[in-house]
Image: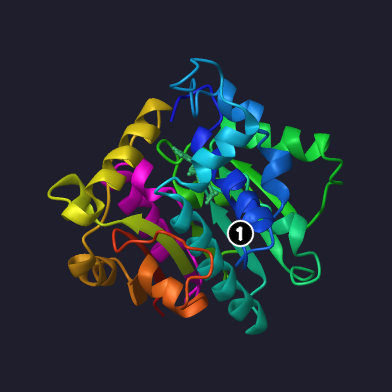
Amino acid sequence: MKEQSPSTTALVTARMRSIHTFADPKPLLDDTWGEKFSPASDLASFGYGGKSVSTNESMTEESIDHLLRNSPAYANVILRSWYSEAALRTAISEGVGQYVLIGAGFDSYACRRAAEAKDLKIFEIDHPSTQALKKQRLIECGVPSDERLHFISADLGQESLESALSRSAFSPEEPAFLSWLGVTMYLSREANMATLESVARYFASGSQLVFSYVDQAIYESVPSGVAEDIAILKQRVKSVGEPFVSGFYPDTLETELRAIGLELEEDIDDLQILERCDPSNTNGLRSSTISRIASVRVKG
Ligand SMILES: C[S@@+](CC[C@H](N)C(=O)[O-])C[C@H]1O[C@@H](n2cnc3c(N)ncnc32)[C@H](O)[C@@H]1O
């Protein structure tokens, strides 16, 4: 991402979640915050959507929302949040008291789930440029500061996860639930492996990490059915300065994780998540096997 600018893709994904909540027939999420955190004017000024091809004028809010609703990334943004928050609920019911969001962006869990999170310490880690805008937006929205919510500003390309968390009230002795959604594809393989190694080394045994990734195959030979979608997606993220750079191979993920002390409990694609949460696909989500989510446990 561009060093001095907040992540445009984080603004985009937040707005997608609120479009889904407001406009889809049977929403899987109840998240209206994207509309407040990520006004369409922001997306236009950060370069998303650009000019209308027909009129060469800046796009309207309606046309930006139409573009986002039809983006090849839309289904994944909804499904990965649905999956992760379902896993988080289970972890809370089993007594986990710490939730770490790596690359939190404009995630609104802390604003939406006060009752569910009443005993939860939440740690949002993000790049300084993105987190500064998130904090500004919370103030603008009149959200009072909350002692359970901790912000940790860190460039994970430069600083390790454990170093970032050690600057906070996070307790590595107690189990935690971690989400890492929509981030790995923007970081190098080395940076991603360093973060996974930090998780294995620093977190209490039994801690759970849910992360999304793209099949490394998209950088090689893309299946013809999704080739156009992948090309559009790559071009759009590149145009806002956040190119896709890495993925994992589903076939070797389990072995790679085991070698660093992590146990892969589940690795599924968007089609399988959809089958779980809305088998008749009431919302017409365009999911694929390219976007995947892994659920991983820190070994004892
Ligand atoms: C596509 S957004 C995903 C945000 C959120 N997890 C979601 O699903 O809506 C990618 C996030 O990764 C963060 N990010 C990218 N590079 C980073 C880095 N080097 N260090 C810390 N965060 C980074 C961005 O600031 C942004 O919040």
**Left or right of residue 61: residue 79:** left
**In the foreground, 8 or 176:** 8
- Residue drawn at (56%, 30%), measured in percent from left and top? 6
* Position in image of residue 39 (x %, y %): 68, 34
Q: Magenta residues: mostly which secondary structure?
A: helix
Label 1, on which residue? 24
Residue lying furthest top in this view? 56
Q: Callout 1: 10 Å neighbours few (<14), some, many (20+)?
A: some
Q: Element under label 1? A: loop
67 drawn magenta:
no
Residue 297 in view in this figure: no
Q: Magenta residues?
A: 182-208
Farthest left residue in view: 221
Res 247 visible: yes
- Which residue type carries mark 1? Asp
Q: Residue at x 35, y 46 (%)?
A: 185
Look at the image and tell me in which quarter the N terminus lies. top left
* Ligand 1 within 8 Å of the CB at mark 1: no
